[in-house]
Image: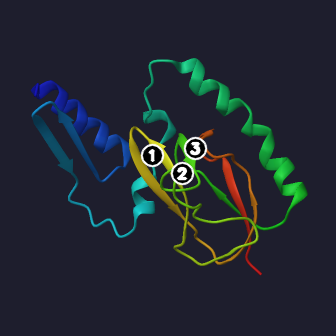
Amino acid sequence: MDIRKVKKLIELLEESGVAEIEIHEGEESVRISRGSTVAAPTTMVHVPQSTIATSNENEVAKPSQAPKSEPSSIDNLTEGHVITSPMVGVFYTSPSPDDPEFISKGQNVKVGDVLCIIEAMKIMNQIESDVSGKLERILVENGEAVEYGQPLFIIDPS
């Protein structure tokens, strides 16, 4: 594997906040990990929006335009705790298409329960609840692209 590729991977890892990455190219592979004390998978998902690089910026721009008007309409429709996306990626409601959804509307959740997966840069990041309560609304469809800070769920903590 080219040393320039490895250096670039290290730079991306440092900028993104991801704790570990493993790449396979044919018979060669490389695993790069930080020496951090990551306690929960949710700490791995804090990726600043500015560090995401894509080859087609038009695709990234389209999803980011729609949700900007959503937070005010969400606040007006339902009171509760809003769980937002900690990164740009693709939203999934289950670990695989054949598995049941992590959570459904009306279900009670506890702190630390997995609510969804966001795929970013071929890494599946579990998003956990940071509050206990009843799931009032799921604001994103399965397989939909989400942006950093986009509302995903509304949980009634009462």
User: Residue 109, which numbered label?
Assistant: none
- Three-letter code for the amino acid on which mark 3 is drawn: Tyr
View extreme (front): residue: 98
In the rendered view, tell whether residue 120 sits above or below residue 18: above
Q: Position of residue 116 (x, y in %)?
A: 56, 57
**Residue at 58% across / 70% down in the picture?**
130
- Three-letter code for the amino acid on which mark 1 is drawn: Val
* Mark 1 residue element: loop
Of the numbered discs 1 and 2, the one sitting upstream in the chain is 1
Q: Position of residue 55 (x, y in %)?
A: 44, 18
Tag 1 near tag 2, CB within 8 Å: yes
* Mark 3 residue element: loop
**Residue at 73% across / 51% down in the picture?**
139
- As measured in the structure, the alpha-carbon distance from the residue carrying label 3 to the one carrying label 2 is 5 Å
Tag 3 near tag 2, CB within 8 Å: yes
Of the numbered discs 3 and 1, the one sitting upstream in the chain is 1
Mark 2 lies on residue = 86
Q: Which image quadrant for residue 156?
A: bottom right
Tag 3 near tag 1, CB within 8 Å: yes
Mark 1 lies on residue = 47
View extreme (right): residue: 76
Q: Is residue 105 left or right of residue 93?
A: right
In the rendered view, tell whether residue 147 sits above or below residue 115: above
Of the numbered discs 3 and 2, the one sitting upstream in the chain is 2
Q: Quadrant of the C terminus?
A: bottom right
- Three-letter code for the amino acid on which mark 2 is drawn: Pro
Q: In terms of depth relative to the viewer, which is nearer, 22 or 13?
A: 22
Q: Which image quadrant for residue 100?
A: bottom right
Mark 3 lies on residue = 148
Q: Position of residue 84 (x, y in %)?
A: 63, 54
In the rendered view, tell whether residue 26 sits above or below residue 92: above
